Amino acid sequence: MDIASKIMLVASILMMGYNISEFLASYQSLSEKAIDLKEIAHENGAGEAAMRRSNFLLSFILSAVYVVLTRFSDFAVWITVLVAVKLVLTLFISDFALLQILRKGEFPRKTYLLSKVDAFLNALLGLVIALFLVL
């Protein structure tokens, strides 16, 4: 197993673990985090555009690294494209959830359910990639 595959395995396990924790998080805890985020943004004078930009850049960089690792781990091109498409959808869902929090000051139930589905699919993606690397 080459170095890219080893890094990919670790990244997949981390992605799976993080998304499982997000999937298992209760509505109450996510709502409290949303309120805290809005308060911190207000205290620091961070505007909506700055918050969205930093969220997008951080998520985009992590997603791009994951996609590049997928390609360097000798996965088929179609798998790399599938991973890229899924992570782009995650970027849009993340931005949508952030907008809901910043504009409404809460985490709406529909956004909560959408984030749950996204977290489940990301955890599943991490598991499948890790299994492909090990088997």
Image: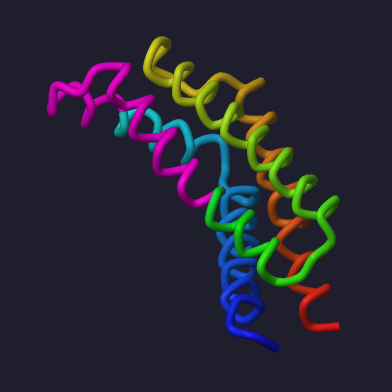
* Image quarter of residue 13: bottom right
Query: Residue extending furthest left?
Result: 44
Give residue 127's position: percent from left, percent from top.
76, 66
| Residue 65 falls left or right of residue 73 | left
Query: Residue extending furthest bottom?
Result: 1
Q: Is residue 51 magenta?
A: yes
Give residue 90's position: percent from left, percent from top.
63, 37
Residue positioned 50% across, 24% down in the render: 107
Q: Is the residue 127 above or below the residue 55 in the image? A: below
| Residue 51 falls left or right of residue 95 | left
Towards the viewer: 49 or 114:
49
Look at the image and give the residue range highlighted in magenta: 38-63
| Residue 99 falls left or right of residue 1 | left
Q: Is the residue 92 above or below the residue 128 in the image? A: above
| Residue 135 falls left or right of residue 24 | right
Residue positioned 65% across, 42% down in the render: 87
Towards the viewer: 27 or 58:
58
Give residue 88's position: percent from left, percent from top.
64, 35
* Image quarter of residue 74: bottom right
Identify the image quadrant of the N terminus: bottom right
Query: Residue extending furthest top?
Result: 103
* Magenta residues, dominant SS class: helix
How is the structure coloured here?
A: rainbow
Residue positioned 38% across, 25% down in the render: 52
Q: Is residue 52 magenta?
A: yes
Identify the image quadrant of the C terminus: bottom right
Residue positioned 59% across, 27% down in the render: 92
Towards the viewer: 71 or 133:
71
Q: Is the residue 15 above or below the residue 60 in the image? A: below
